[in-house]
Image (cartoon, helix red, strand yellow):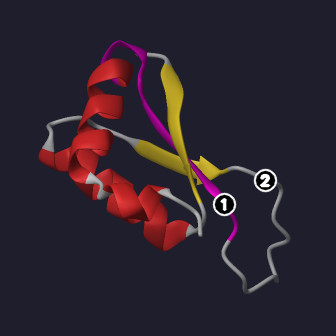
Amino acid sequence: MTRMVQVAVAGDVTEAEELQAILRSAGIESEVEAAVEHHPRETEDAPQKVLVPEGSLEAAKDAIEALTERDELIDT
């Protein structure tokens, strides 16, 4: 099994799914897991880690950078 490594941290599940769509369009598989311990009854989305195969890390970073608008990355 290929070792999975973190390529990004999304603020919530929706953002993680958007990153997964970007990666999928670049032909890169990905997985999502909670970035912090989250109480099961809490309704607020927790930050999510986006993981890719170790050998695809650089390609995944490039894909996210190329397909994400710069102003979305700047926290204002």
Image quarter of residue 55: top left
Q: Which of 12 and 39 is in front in this view?
A: 12
Q: Which of 69 and 15 is in front in this view?
A: 69
Is residue 70 visible to us here?
yes
Image quarter of residue 29: top left
Quarter holding the C terminus? bottom right
In the rendered view, would you say 28 is above or below 19?
above
User: At x 35% / y 55%, what residue is drawn?
Assistant: 70
Where residue 36 is drawn, which disc sits there? Answer: 2
Q: Where is residue 75 in the image (x, y as percent from the top left)?
A: 58, 63
Kindly identify which residue carries mark 1: 47
Image quarter of residue 18: bottom left
User: At x 24% / y 38%, what residue is drawn?
Assistant: 63
Disc 1 residue crowd, few under 14, some 14–19, many 20+, Cα 10 Å: many
Q: Is mark 1 on a helix, strand or loop?
A: loop
Q: Are marks 2 and 1 in contact (CB under 8 Å)?
A: yes
Q: What residue type is labelled 2?
A: Val
Quarter holding the N terminus? top left
Q: Which amino acid does label 1 sit on?
A: Pro
Q: Give the range drawn in magenta.
A: 46-56
Q: Position of residue 51 (x, y in %)?
A: 48, 36
> Left or right: where does residue 69 sit relative to residue 9?
left
